[in-house]
Amino acid sequence: MAWATSLQDIAGLPIEADIDQRIIPILLKIDSAGLLVDQLRGFGIEVISEEDEGWIIGASVDAFNKLLAKINRFDSATNQGTAYLWEIDSGIGWKREYVLSADLQQKLDNLSDDEVLDLDISIACNIHVPDKPIRNEGETQQRYDQRMERWMEKVNKRDEVQDARMEQFSRIVSHYGSIIQTFDYSDSFGIRAKILVKGLKDILYNYPYVFEIQEHDYLEGIFNAVNEDGVAQVQINAPPNDAPKVCIIDSGIMEGHRLLNPAIDHLASKNYVPGEDTVADHAPGGGHGTRVAGAALYPYDIPADGNINLPFWIQNARILNRRAKLSDNIFLPNLMQQIVNDFSPTKIYNLSVSSSAPCQTNHMSLWATAIDKLMWERDILFVVAVGNLFKYGVPGRPGIHDFIVGGNAYPRYLLTERYCRVANPAQSSFALSVGSVTIGEYEDDDRISFGKTFGNYPAPSPFSRTGPGLWGMIKPDVVEFGGDLVREKGQRVNIIEHHTTSPQLVKSIETSQEALGKDSVGTSYAAPKVAHIAAVLQHTFRTESCLFHRGLIVQSARLPDYALHQPGEDHLRHFGYGVPSIFRALDNNTRRVTLFATGSINAKHTDIYTLRIPNQIRRPGADFQVMIEVTLSYKASPRRTRKRTSSYLSTWLDWKSSKLGESLDDFTRRVINVADEQEGEIVEAGEWEEEYTEIPWKIRERGNWGQVQTFKRQDSTLQKDWAILEANALPSEFNLAVLGHRGWSIDLEQEVPYALFVSLEILNPEIGIDIYNAIRVENEIEIPVQVAVQV
C-alpha cells in the first residue's frame, strides 16, 4: 500500500514511531449531490477537510476495512452508497498540492532540511457535539437531566479525542522544533510552531490529520508619512458615561492628546506586546493607532474651533511594538480571544492592521476563523481594514510602482494581480471588511493623483486591496474615504502622499512635531470611519444586536453614482456595496423609508414578510424612479475544515422576493416548493416562471441571472441587492422570504439569528410625494407580517 511505502521511504525519522499505520490519509472525490460529507463516517473515513469540486481529504480509521466491505457488496440493493465515490487516491502525491500553501509549494524544493520555518499548521479533529440542551417548556427535571448527561458524555468523548490528538502532534513536533501557541476551533486546531524543514516534510507526508500548512503571515508595514503643521483649537467634551465603547486594536494610542484624551477609557488600556510595558503609540512618523483612534472619533473633519461632544469612548489594545511590528511570540487567534475577553462587554473592535500577503483562497485562515468564531459566540462586531499595497515593493511582495513599471496600469492591476487580493483577516465571513476610495483630486504640471486619471469620482484608492473574498463572497463589504496617492507624469513613476488627497488625521507628538496632519493614507483610516457609524448605531438602537448594526451599515451603503444604475463585477470588487451613510442609516424622511425585521430561523424553514405599497406612489402615469434595497445580515457556527459558505457554516440563509404582480399566496407556494439546493444555488419549481416578471435585481441568486455577473447573493453572509423601477411598475404588495438551508450541522433544529432590511427611496428630487408617511399609513396595522412555514 502507498501509505506503508511512504513510511518506509522516510524510515529512520522519529515521526514513524508516533503514527498509527492503520489510520491512512486518503483523497477522494464524491458526488456531493447524492452523498453528504458526514456520511463518509459510515465508510470508516474521518473527514479531514472539504476541498473544491467534491474533493475530500480524509483518513481511513480502520485501514479501509469498512470501505472495502461496502465496495465488495456494491451490487447489494442496500449498499449503493459507494456509487457516490467517484475517485480514490490512497497515495501521498496529492498532499503537496492540497495541504501546502502556494508559496510553500514553490519554495519547498529549494529549502535545506536544517532551515527553521515559522509555520501555521491546521490539524483536523471533527468530533461533532450538538449545542448544550435547553430545558423545554413542560419538560420534567429528570428528562432534562438525562439529556444533559448524554450531552456531557459526547463532550467528554470529544475532549478525550482532542487531548490525545494534540498530545500526539506535540510529541511529533518536539523532534523538530517547538509549538509556540495553539487555538481550538472545535473541529480543528490552529498551531503556530517553529519547525525544521525536514519536520515539515515528515508532517506533510506522514501525519494523517493535517489539512493546511503555511508560513506565518506577517503584518504589513505602515506607510511612511511626511509632516504638515496644524493644531486644532476646539473645546472637546467627554462622551456620556453610558456611551458605547470602540476598542482600537493597533500600535497603541497617545492617550494624552488633547483631541483624544476626553474620550479615552484609561482604566481599560492594555499592552499585549511582550517585553514592552507601555500603551503609548511609538509607531514612527506620528503614530498609527493614534491616527486610527482620531479617524474613529472625527471621521469627516476636525473643526478648528467650537464645541464637540464626543459620541463614544475609545479603548486602547496595543499589539504592535515600537517598530509597528507584531512580535513573533504572538499567535493572533489567541490574541483576538484574549482581547475580547479583556474588553468585554465592549461590542465594537476596530482592526486596522492586516497581513502583508493576500489572503489564501483555500480554507478560511486561522485568524479570520477566530474572528468568525468570536462573532458567532458573542454579540460583537469586528471592523477590519482590507489592507494596503506597498508603494514600492519588497522581495516577494511587489508594490504599486512594480505593477506600473511592469506594464499593468492603475486601476487594472487592482483586479488582475493576485497580490492585490484582500489581506488576511479581511476575508472573514462575519467581519465588516472596509476598503478605501479616493479623497479629492490633484494635478499640476508635473504630478497627478491616481483618482484623477480614473475619470470618475470617487475612484478606488490605488493602494486599496480588492475582492472577491473566499468562495465568491463580496469583499470589501463597504468602502470609506481613506485617501489617494500622487505620481509623476510621464515615464517616471515616483509615488508620494499629498495633503490635497489625504484625510486629516490626529498624530502622536511623541514621534512627530505636529498634532494634526494630512500626510498619510490607507485603508487603516477608512475602517475606523465605519466603526464610528457602528458606534452611533449601537447608541441609537441600544436593544438591537451587532448583527443588526452590521446589516444597517450595509443597507445604508451605496455605490458611486456612475455605478449605481449599471453596476458591474469590477465595481463590487473595488467598492463592495459602496460608501455607507450615517444619515441613510438613521433617517426616515419624505424621500426614503427603511423597514426592518429581526428573527432566528433553522434549516428547512422560511420566514415570510409582506409590505403594501400605496396607490399614491405607484399610480398610473407616475414617471419617477423608485429604488428598492434589501439587505440580509446573519451569522452561524463556522467550521475551518469546510469550504464554500454553504459548508463553512452550520446553517446558511438567503432571501427571495416576490415577482411583479405575484400575490402573497402565490409567493408562499413558490418559496415552499424549492426543489433542490446544491452548491449554494437555488433551483426552483418552474410553473410560475412565465406567469410573473422578475424584479430586476442587480446581483440575484445565480452568477448569470443578475446584471452583475459572477457574484451570487447567497455566497455572502451580508446579502444586499437593489432594483430601480418606474413608480408605476411597482406592485401593490412586495413580499420577502428568508430561507434557512442545511450547512455542515446535522442538527436541523439549531436556529441562527438574522436581521432583514427593506428601503424604498424616490430618486427624482423634484417629486413631492412623502414616501415615508405613505408607507406608514398603508402598513400601520402591522409592519411587517411574518409567517413561519416549513419548507
Image (cartoon, rainbow, N blue to C red):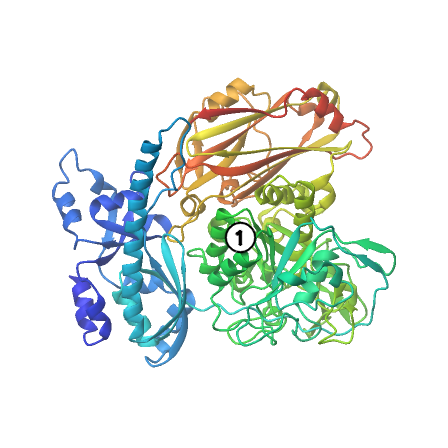
Number of numbered tags placed on the structure image: 1
Give x and y (percent) for residue 350.
Answer: 61, 57
Which residue is situated farthest in the right direction here? 305
Give x and y (percent) for residue 353.
Answer: 58, 64
Q: Which residue occupies 69% across, 61% down?
A: 293
Left or right for 582, reference 60:
right
Residue 408 falls in image quadrant:
bottom right
Give x and y (percent) for residue 345.
Answer: 58, 51
Which residue is identified by label 1? 468
SS for dot 1: loop
Looking at the image, can residue 460 be seen? no
Residue 213 falls in image quadrant:
bottom left
Looking at the image, can residue 390 be seen? yes
Residue 689 lies, with reference to residue 337, above or below; the image says above
Viewer-side residue, 647 vs 367:
367
Q: Which residue occupies 13% across, 36% down?
A: 76
Task: Specify the quadrant that holds the N terminus.
Answer: bottom left
Viewer-side residue, 90 vs 607:
607
Left or right for 67, reference 471:
left
Residue 179 lies, with reference to residue 560, above or below; the image says below
Left or right for 85, reference 498:
left
Give x and y (percent) for residue 426.
Answer: 54, 57
Residue 184 lies, with reference to residue 752, above or below; the image says below
**Mark 1 Cα-neighbour bin, 10 Å: few <14, some 14–19, many ≥20:** many
Task: Specify the quadrant that holds the C terminus.
Answer: top left
